[in-house]
Image (spheres, rainbow, N blue to C red):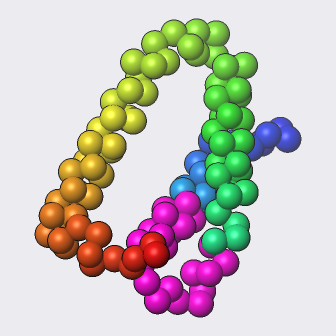
Amino acid sequence: MGGRLDRTTTNCCKGIAAIIIMLHHISFRLSNLPVYVKPIWYIAFPIVGFFFFMSGYGLTCGLLQKRNYLQGFLSKRLLNIIAPYVIVAIVWIGLEIIGGGANTYKSNC
């Protein structure tokens, strides 16, 4: 490894951080949270910073190792960003329609 984190390790770290962030967002919509979910409220904000740090680390390593790393950068990643977004948005809208909207979730009052 040579003193650096490899791609597999950083992807695993980002994956765990993403799961924690998703659980944090899901907990906004649920009532009667289990006790083991409560710590997520306290660690979610630093986890977002950790996720961005690991992402930036990977981008920096790629930039330093590959000569033409930024050539076609946006076009290569655009589909990887937009496709999951559209899928999640369609599923979310479907669940909102089926579930009757915000009435099935806890009230923010």
Magenta-drawn stretch contains 32? yes
Residue at left offset 23%, top offset 67%: 101
- Quick one: 81 or 94, which is closer to the camera? 94
Instruction: Locate residue 69, reporting x and y percent.
Output: 58, 15
Quarter holding residue 105: bottom left
Q: Is residue 54 visible?
A: no
- At horizontal 39% and vertical 79% (from top left) the residue drawn is 106
Residue nearest the observer in this picture, 102 or 49: 102
From the viewer's perspective, tell me whether residue 25 is left or right of residue 56. Answer: left
Question: Does residue 17 appear anywhere in the picture?
Answer: yes
Q: Is residue 32 left or right of residue 37?
A: left
- Residue lying furthest left in this view? 98
Which residue is at a point 19% across and 73% down the rendered structure image?
Answer: 99
Q: Position of residue 11 (x, y in %)?
A: 58, 48
Front one among 29 and 72? 29
State the predominant SS element of the stretch in magenta.
helix
Image position of 41 with respect to 9: above or below: below
Magenta highlight range: 19-40
Residue 55 spot, x, y in % from top left: 63, 39
Q: How many marks?
A: 0
- In the rendered structure, does residue 10 fall within the stretch colored magenta? no
Q: Quadrant of residue 26?
A: bottom left
**Residue 17 vertical placement versus 89 (above, below):** below
Residue visible at 54% across and 56% down in the picture: 18
Q: Quadrant of the N terminus?
A: top right
Residue ranking furthest to the front = 109
* Quarter location, residue 47: bottom right
The x and y percentages for residue 96 are 22, 64
